[in-house]
Image (cartoon, helix red, strand yellow):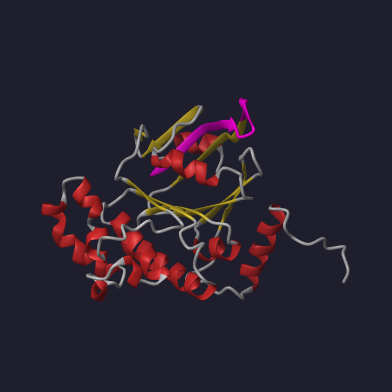
Amino acid sequence: MSAATVTTEVAALRIVGVSKDFPTPDNVNTRTLALDNVSFAVRAGELVSLVGPSGCGKSTLLRLLAGLDDPNTGERWIGAEPITGPSAERGLVFQDPNLFPWLTVRRNIQSGLVARGRLREKRHEVDEFMRLVGLETFANAYPHHLSGGMAQRVALARALINHPKVLLLDEPLGALDAFTRMRMQDEVLRLWQTRRTTVLLVTHDIDETIYMSDRIIIMTPRPGRIERTIPITLDRPRQRNRPEFLRLRSEILELLHFAGDPKSTV
């Protein structure tokens, strides 16, 4: 999606010309450019993935969109409103579920409502969201009783109960084993298809991004720029062994320069 398209399209989320630098760790007098003139948009109800090498600024970009940090240059928009700081309309889920260990599943899920003073009017939704993520029988369990996948479902429910316009996912399945990760990919897709929340997903897993996304945004090595946007038109549910799926996988690996040299021999 071009910058011109970004500036004219009505989108749930868009950024225009965003750049961000940080102090260089070993030299406080210099700065390292993390993001350079990044522009893209995410349509309402769309699931878009950000993919790129480690250190290309993907997580930095999510923090900027969450309002946890400010860019050096550029604009960030949620609908028609500029992003000026954190807001419940942008839910952020990290790789670590970051649950409160002293709170039960129920109280972890409702913690955002408590912080916003909305629990009294929204209490009835807590049971609804526990059912949505399949944890109603674990309402009184504590985080140490939960598997990694269950804990991540609590984190998703805690973000979704605030009815965010956009859900920002920063490698939310990265710490899970391969089989649990695939099950959780289906869980996230089910939640997305049920609620049609706009989702921006950061992941290093190429199969995951093809399996889940409507579009994939490929980023360059640092400083992060948009290399290419790839629409995924495969029908859902997607089959990981289909030729079209494998072709896309090879194309993305080639773009990321991880594909093997076709001239090499064993």
**Viewer-side residue, 52 vs 213:** 52
**Viewer-side residue, 184 vs 262:** 184
Say whether residue 111 is magenta.
no
Residue sitting at x 83%, y 63%: 262
**Viewer-side residue, 112 vs 199:** 112
Q: Position of residue 234 (x, y in %)?
A: 54, 66
Q: Quadrant of the C terminus?
A: bottom right
Residue sitting at x 19%, y 66%: 127
The magenta stretch spans which residues? 12-31
Q: Position of residue 153 (x, y in %)?
A: 36, 65
Residue 45: which quarter of the image? bottom left
Farthest top residue in view: 29
Farthest left residue in view: 120
Residue sitting at x 39%, y 64%: 152
Q: Position of residue 93 (x, y in %)?
A: 40, 54
Q: Is residue 175 above or below residue 67?
A: below
Residue 14: which quarter of the image? top left
Left or right: where does residue 106 sit relative to residue 250? left
Q: Is residue 50 above or below residue 137?
A: above
Q: Is residue 238 above or below residue 230?
A: below
Say whether residue 30 is magenta.
yes
Residue sitting at x 53%, y 54%: 215
Residue 233 visible in the picture: no
Q: Main secondary structure of the magenta part?
A: strand
Q: Position of residue 1 (x, y in %)?
A: 55, 44
